[in-house]
Image (cartoon, helix red, strand yellow):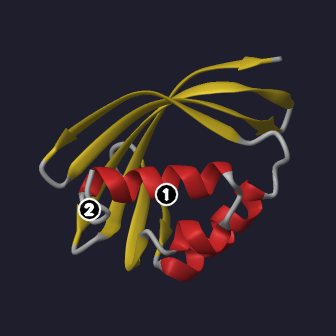
Amino acid sequence: MSASTPESIVQRQLDAYNARDVEGLMATYAEDVQQFEYPDTLLCSGAAQLRERMTARLSDPYLHARLIHRAVTGSVVIDHEEVTRTFPDGTGKIELVAIYEVRHGKIVTARFISGQRTLT
């Protein structure tokens, strides 16, 4: 896997997420990135909002995303993950599908579909 393929860029993003590395994570996203709750509920727009969102998320000591399956078609990478994190009512796991679009070596959009959540 080449270092500049959409798959490798999304993998670097996942690795930085699990390492709680804000700078490494931000390096994988475009300045004008947008994240959505699928299909079109805007979660953040632009690198500054993403940094704020991710800094808060990455402060969770229980945070970990386990990749279940990845599909790649052209510039689109779809990850099926199980994410362990702290929710307002306790620590648990949630199934998540993340749809990333990569252009010019950066993630430009990410759409998230949340599945079943279980508390531990």
> Could you tell me which residue is drawn at 31 percent across and 39 percent down?
78
Callout 1 environment at 10 Å: few (<14), some (14 to 19), or many (20+)? many
Name the N-terminal-most of marks 2 and 1.
1
> Could you tell me which residue is drawn at 79 percent across and 36 percent down?
87
* Residue 35 location (% of width, % of height): 44, 59
How many tags in the picture? 2
Q: Label for residue 102? A: 2
Assign a secondary structure to mark 2. Answer: strand
> Could you tell me which residue is drawn at 52 percent across and 50 percent down?
14
Residue 101 lies in quadrant: bottom left
Q: Is 76 placed above or below 94 here?
A: below
- State the quadrant of the C terminus: top right
* Residue 88 location (% of width, % of height): 83, 38
Assign a secondary structure to mark 1. Answer: helix
Residue tagged 1: 13
Q: Label for residue 76? A: none
Residue type beneath disc 1: Gln
> Could you tell me which residue is drawn at 49 percent across and 75 percent down?
27
* Residue 24 location (% of width, % of height): 57, 69
Eye-nearest disc, 2 or 1: 1
Q: Is 92 placed above or below 62 here?
A: above
Left or right placement of residue 53 versus residue 67 in this view:
right
Residue 19 lies in quadrant: bottom right
Residue closest to the eye, 12 or 74? 12
Residue type beneath disc 2: Val
Q: Is 109 placed above or below 67 here?
A: below
Disc 2 + disc 1, Cβ < 8 Å: no
Distance from label 2 to label 1 (Cα)? 12 Å
* Residue 3 location (% of width, % of height): 32, 63
Left or right placement of residue 34 versus residue 62 in this view:
left
